[in-house]
Amino acid sequence: MEDLTLEEVEELHGKLVILNEELRLLIDLSEDETRPVDLDEPIGRLSRMDAIAQQNIDLANRRAAQVRIQRIRVALQRIADGEYGSCLSCGDPIGVRRLGARPEAPFCILCQSQREAGHSASVSRPTGRG
């Protein structure tokens, strides 16, 4: 896998900025949906349970958006520092296809898979470097 070109970094930077704006808008718009459900409102028990379940889904989506915004901030800082595109775990290039799908991705696909599987990210791997 090769390092990113300047054009690829610029394109991914643009994606990160747009994604950040979209997520911030989503968080702003979801504020009403995440307010506590009024238990005294006479809407019926099942409707209240549905409202509480929907509120929990909205809260989880809001938290996920906030985490993603934080990762975007880190990715934008890594671009500014000239470190963007390298896996934070192994140091290998992350890959333009992965970054195209998730421009805020801090790990290559192998390290991310290992993290998700609960394995240590320090498992040895071939780097293809001489």
Image: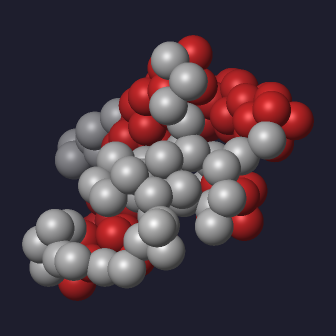
Q: Position of residue 110 (x, y in %)?
A: 40, 76
Q: Position of residue 94 (x, y in %)?
A: 54, 58
Q: Position of residue 57 (x, y in %)?
A: 39, 60
Q: Is residue 95 above or below residue 64?
A: below
Question: Is 67 in front, or is 51?
Answer: 67
Q: Position of residue 114 (x, y in %)?
A: 27, 78
At x 55%, y 36%, the residue is 84
Question: Is 28 in front, or is 18?
Answer: 18
Q: Quadrant of residue 98?
A: bottom right
At x 22%, y 47%, the residue is 39
- Name, please, the residue furthest toward the front: 130
Residue 123 seen in this snapshot:
yes
At x 43%, y 28%, the residue is 74
- Colour style of the rendered protein structure: secondary structure
- Name, please, the residue furthest toward the top: 80
Q: Does residue 122 appear left or right of residue 47 in this picture?
A: left
Q: Is residue 20 above or below residue 15?
A: above
Q: Quadrant of residue 100?
A: bottom right
At x 45%, y 58%, the residue is 92
Q: Does residue 4 appear left or right of residue 75 in this picture?
A: right
Residue 18 seen in this snapshot:
no
Q: Which quarter of the rendered picture does the N terminus lie within?
A: bottom right
Number of residue marks: 0
Question: Is 66 in front, or is 49?
Answer: 66
Q: Does residue 58 appear left or right of residue 39 in this picture?
A: right
